[in-house]
Image (cartoon, rainbow, N blue to C red):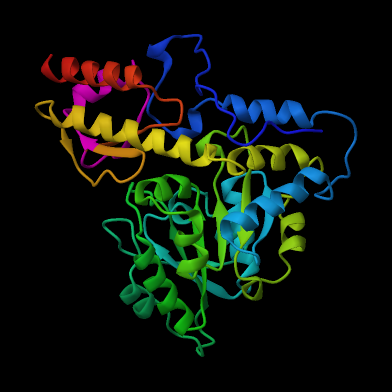
Amino acid sequence: MTLPPAGHRSNGRTPSASGSAGRGFASDNQASVHPDVLAALAAVNDGHQPAYGDDEVTGRLREVVRRHFGDQAEVFPVFNGTGANVVSLQAVSERWSSVVCPDSAHINTDECGAAEKIAGLKLVTAPAPDGKLTPEQVEAHATGFDNVQRRRPAAVSVTQSTELGTVYTAAETAAVAAAAHERGLAVHMDGARIANAAASLGLPLRALTTDAGVDVLSFGGTKNGLLLGEAIVVLNPDSVRGLAYLRKSSMQLASKMRYVSAQLVALLDGDLWLRNAAHANAMAARLAAAARAVPGVEITRAVEANAVFATAPKDAAERLRKRFPFYTWDERTGEVRWVCSFDTTEADVDAFAAALAAETSA
């Protein structure tokens, strides 16, 4: 049973039945699966292997993860990002706990209350115009430890890159982690797009996580070329308890785990994770530059990873959306979000920018 060698390269494109017009900028979740990941799945689809993570592929994943995050790192593959976040937060908290996070955090806005429903937690949100939590906000919101009338703070959660397309520097994460640890709180990172953040900053994954004081990471794969699968990476084993049991009781334990692990190995064993993310970031930068040149279009937020936020005339945006799918981020202001993926091409970006200019001037 052999995975493709590290460094194996392909162009990352798979044909689209509907052509370039069928490709959109709604989400990196809508992208195709990287061919190297599909090849990795085919490579492990041979014979029988022990179930539930006792297979040799998951064993290899543990070695690969430790190369990136340090010798103490423990990895727990799961099915999806919501599962990774919920299980991670359960492992650092109690049923009476609260978690401090930015108001725009995915766990607060886009996971149907899973952290509160499944884990029984209370999310305490802080306003963050740039999507980033600050040490001062941790200090302000991590209160009431000895008040039985209130939820007891247990953790903070940061998102990297943020839901607003911004990136925490390593120093910013370290400052938040220090403020949390001073108060006895664990630090969770929702790293659905951590590869994009690392590519943006030119830093290894460890510098943004282990070395910055993060205790447990939800590592994202689906948005960076995987078919399905994320991973919980425990960076500080002393910060969690019962995670293996929580993963099972939260319905996130795969029986044929080698198929999830193989994808993560394909992503992390070489530089595929970085190449995919760097390309998506570059396409976002190209798109932002082209959109800035269109009269009536304004880029509304810093473009630091693979997302571009903008405003455009509403009627032009509605016409454009019929040709290239994307989401409206804020109905009140008309702000939209365009997300680039590992398989977004320069031709995709240029066609979209040309259509944007045409619809805006119509």
The residue depicted at 26 percent of the width and 29 percent of the height is 287
Nearer to us in this view, 337 or 213: 213
Count all numbered tags in the image, as a single digit.
0
Residue 286, how many percent across, how many down? 26, 30
Nearer to us in this view, 273 or 330: 273
Q: Quadrant of residue 143?
A: bottom left
Q: Quadrant of residue 203?
A: bottom left
Residue 155, how many percent across, how many down? 51, 72
Vertical position of residue 268 compared to residue 74: above or below: above
Q: Quadrant of residue 226?
A: top right
- The part of the chain drawn in magenta is 310-333
Q: Is residue 118 in sight in this rendering?
A: no
Does the magenta-highlighted stretch encompass residue 320? yes
Nearer to us in this view, 108 or 239: 239
The residue depicted at 30 percent of the width and 63 percent of the height is 127
Image quadrant in which the C terminus is located = top left
Vertical position of residue 62 compared to residue 141: above or below: above
Does the magenta-highlighted stretch encompass residue 251? no
Vertical position of residue 68 compared to residue 328: above or below: below
Image quadrant in which the N terminus is located = top right
The residue depicted at 89 percent of the width and 44 percent of the height is 50
Q: Is residue 197 in sight in this rendering?
A: yes
Q: Outermost residue, bottom direction?
A: 146
Residue 148, how many percent across, how many down? 54, 87
Residue 121, how many percent across, how many down? 56, 67
Vertical position of residue 11 compared to residue 251: above or below: above
Query: In the picture provided, is 32 more to the left or to the right than 165?
Result: right
Query: In the picture provided, is 226 more to the left or to the right than 129?
Result: right
Query: In the picture provided, is 7 more to the left or to the right than 30?
Result: right
